Amino acid sequence: MTHDHSHDGPNRRKVLECMTWAGTGVLWTIAGGVPTSLGIVDEAMAQAAGSLTFLQISDSHVGFDKPANPNAKGTLEEAIGKIKTLPVKPSFMIHTGDITHLSKEQEFDDAEKIISQSRLDVHYVPGEHDIVDPDIALYKERYGRGTKGSGWYSFDANGVHFIGLVNVANLKAGGLGSLGDEQLEWIEDDLKARSASQPVVVFAHIPLWTVYPEWGWGTDDSARALGYLKRFGSVTVLNGHIHQVMQKVEGNVTFHTARSTAFPQPAPGSAPSPGPMKVPEDKLRGMLGVASVTFKQNEQRLAIIDTPLQG
Amino acid sequence: MTKQFMLGLVALVLLAIPALADDIQVKIDNFTFNPPQVKVKAGTTVVWTNGDDIPHTVVSKTGAFRSKALDTDNTFSFTFTKPGNYIYFCSLHPHMTGTIVVEETTGDGAPK
């Protein structure tokens, strides 16, 4: 019953696949923007064997204690608990920022204590909540080793090139997220010598596509970064910040945002502001969660499975 | 006579300052500064209060002032002594902007 990807249409090199666990156990695959039902979750898990699987968590906001979720630490613990029970151990985890709520030392310490229980290597990028001090001192002393500028870096895993970017520093009045010239030049340089057939995963806190500028959900100079990625056959952009799953496929690029582990935010324009959304207690865990991303060797496609804490 | 008059004038001016300098309140709600534009006399203190469940900052575009991150109900105040247009924003959510217009103190309280 395992779905064989090798017979999926002629232009599979360019087709990227996104799967969302809709809560009922059904997987949806979105290929070229057309959603089709694929199977049940266990099949996707079986496919994960023998390939690169990594996890994305985001927006844990350790220290948040407002009505939308008085215990953000508790729901992060639940998320890590779920990760520990995964049938296939992921290779590593990325955290797409807002680790803490107010960049406090205690919040960073608490986050570390909880996340380290996953026993996975974690690659971080900061959210605006992690660099409240203009010098970014607390974030950098914990996660800045081996990074450039305000904390960007790249690494390779199983033939996939990963680029962690910072688009929350030195923001300009009236603007959106920003990468800045220095980082953009570094991206150009980092990609220059690479083969266009190498899959690239870019991760950053604020979406690198314009989701909703009225709420600041976009990055002013992301088009330049995406320009450097144009020649690559498979590009996956993973973001957080908006505390909900959203995805878009544009040519060779798949954009995806992950859920928060702390609190949900409203759909674009559906509320007066993007602030924390209070939902009934029994609905909260259905709106929080983590994502897992799988690459199969020799196939330039990925599968993203968003798993809520409950549902 | 003249000297006494001058001293009296100075005293009047000094007395007048606190009256001119009533604090002006700016509320941060739903990711906006309310009101977004405020006109004040030089010497006025503006107090920002964050009513959101998300931290915000109050940062001058030119570096004239910069608050720490304001958690819910935290306040930041700044006294504007020099006339001018002060554009500010939230450095965490830069689409949030506001302006304080500071005018000379000449006028009502000053001797003609």
Image (spheres, coloured by chain):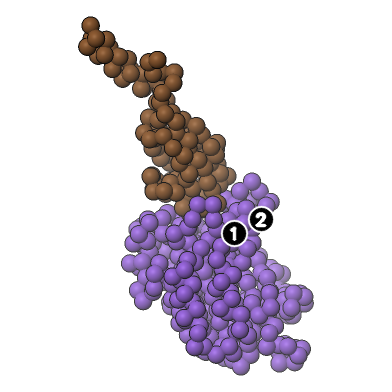
Chain colours: A purple, B brown
Quadrant of residue A225 in the image?
A: bottom right
Q: Which percent across, then down, holds residue A267?
A: 66, 56
Q: Is residue A35 above or below residue B91?
A: below
Residue B15 left/right relative to A12: left
- Rendering quarter of residue A242: bottom right
Residue occupying image coordinates x 45% and y 61%: A169
Q: Going by the picture, which residue comes out furthest to the top?
A: B1
Circle 2: element type = loop
**Vertical order, A257 against A103 (above or below):** below
Q: Amino acid at mark 1?
A: Trp
Tag 1 residue: A217
Q: Which sits earlier in the primary sequence, circle 1 or circle 2? A: 1
Closest to the observer, A306 or A268: A268
| 3D distance between C-alphas at marks 1 and 2 | 9 Å
Q: Is residue A17 above or below residue A66?
A: below
Q: Nearer the viewer, residue B41 or B31?
A: B41
Residue corresponding to mark 2: A268
Q: Chain ID for label 1?
A: A
Q: Position of residue A23 (x, y in %)?
A: 68, 68
* Residue in the picture at 59% in, 76% down: A227
Subunit of label 2: A
In front: B44, or A165? B44
Q: Marks 1 and 2: which is nearer the front?
A: 1
Co-location on one chain, circles 1 and 2 = yes
- Quarter assignment of residue A239: bottom right
